[in-house]
Image (tube, rainbow, N blue to C red):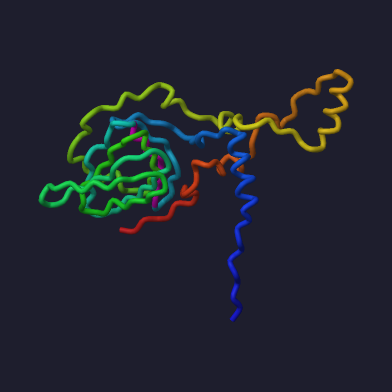
């Protein structure tokens, strides 16, 4: 039986990546999708298939979601930004509050009332059965209605998500650029200027722990 060793991480590569991130000054990944205002903040549309769907739920700081309840199905949340609390309500009406932060994954089990409270802007990636919302009950409304700005609801376009980061030019143009500078000439902007590839975009630091391929949820 062959035993394959796990490849070792090169610390120099980690350091190099950290330096690139600092120079690019990437604060957070931009999420492309339709944005819809809610009483607690807003949601960003994600993926929808025959069996499950995903979206991002944003709870603004100081706000909380309604107290939700589903009798039969689960819902999975992964925290991608901010911090807050995951609250569940027991049969004797006692509330269990669990502190949550980036990287935490939570399962809202069937038959258990639950809600989220945001200490700071709480960003969560949500995966659920495609029929989950049809039978989701709202036991209690939000305590404070969130004040959502027009900027929060502005849809991010494909042009927006590729227009940040350092200016990059193809290596093949370096010699031509230097020669033009010596002659006092100015080259036209290259097609790659101010752009990052889609692969690089989704490698942003705030997408660590992010479910790129969500899993289907069982009953």
Whether residue 53 is situated above or below residue 150 in the rendered picture: below
Q: Looking at the picture, tell me which residue is in the foreground, 87 or 114.
A: 87
- Prevailing secondary structure of the magenta residues: strand
Q: Tell me residue 64's x, y (percent).
A: 27, 35
Residue found at the very far left of the displayed protein: 92
Residue at (55%, 34%) from the top-left corner? 26
Q: Looking at the picture, tell me which residue is in the foreground, 63 or 131.
A: 63
Total numbered circles: 0
Is 61 contained in the magenta span? Answer: no
Horizontal side of residue 37 vs 64, given as left or right = right
Where is residue 18, by image quadrant? top right
Horizontal side of residue 172 vs 55, given as left or right = right
Placement of the C terminus among the 4 image quadrants: bottom left
Residue span colored magenta: 52-60
Whether residue 29 is situated above or below residue 73 in the rendered picture: above
Where is residue 67, by image quadrant? top left
Horizontal side of residue 52 vs 141, given as left or right = right
Where is residue 83, by image quadrant? top left
Q: Tell me residue 170's x, y (percent).
A: 76, 36
Residue at (41%, 39%) from the top-left corner? 81
Q: Tell me residue 10's x, y (percent).
A: 63, 56
Q: Tell me residue 24's x, y (percent).
A: 61, 34
Placement of the N terminus among the 4 image quadrants: bottom right
Horizontal side of residue 15 vs 120, given as left or right = right
Residue found at the very far top of the displayed protein: 184
Residue found at the very far bottom of the displayed protein: 1
Whether residue 127 is situated above or below residue 1 in the rendered picture: above
């Amino acid at each position: 039986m062959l035993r394959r060793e796990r490849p070792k991480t090169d610390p120099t590569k980690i350091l190099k990546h950290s330096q690139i991130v600092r120079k690019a000054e990437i604060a957070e990944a931009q999420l492309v999708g339709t944005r819809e205002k809610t009483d607690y903040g807003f949601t960003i549309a994600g993926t929808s298939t025959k069996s499950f769907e995903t979206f991002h739920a944003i709870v603004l700081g100081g706000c909380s979601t309604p107290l939700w309840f589903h009798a039969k199905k689960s819902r999975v949340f992964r925290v991608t930004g901010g911090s807050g609390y995951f609250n569940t309500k027991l049969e004797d009406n006692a509330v269990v509050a669990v502190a949550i932060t980036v990287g935490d994954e939570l399962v809202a089990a069937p038959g258990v009332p639950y809600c989220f409270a945001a200490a700071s802007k709480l960003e969560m990636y949500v995966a659920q059965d495609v029929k989950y919302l049809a039978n989701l009950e709202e036991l209690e409304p939000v305590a404070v209605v969130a004040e959502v700005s027009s900027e929060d609801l502005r849809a991010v376009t494909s042009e927006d998500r590729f227009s940040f980061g350092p200016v990059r030019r193809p290596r093949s143009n370096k010699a031509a650029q230097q020669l033009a500078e010596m002659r006092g000439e100015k080259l036209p902007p290259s097609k790659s200027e101010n752009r990052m590839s889609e692969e690089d975009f989704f490698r942003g630091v705030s997408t660590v722990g992010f479910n790129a391929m969500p899993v289907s949820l069982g009953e």
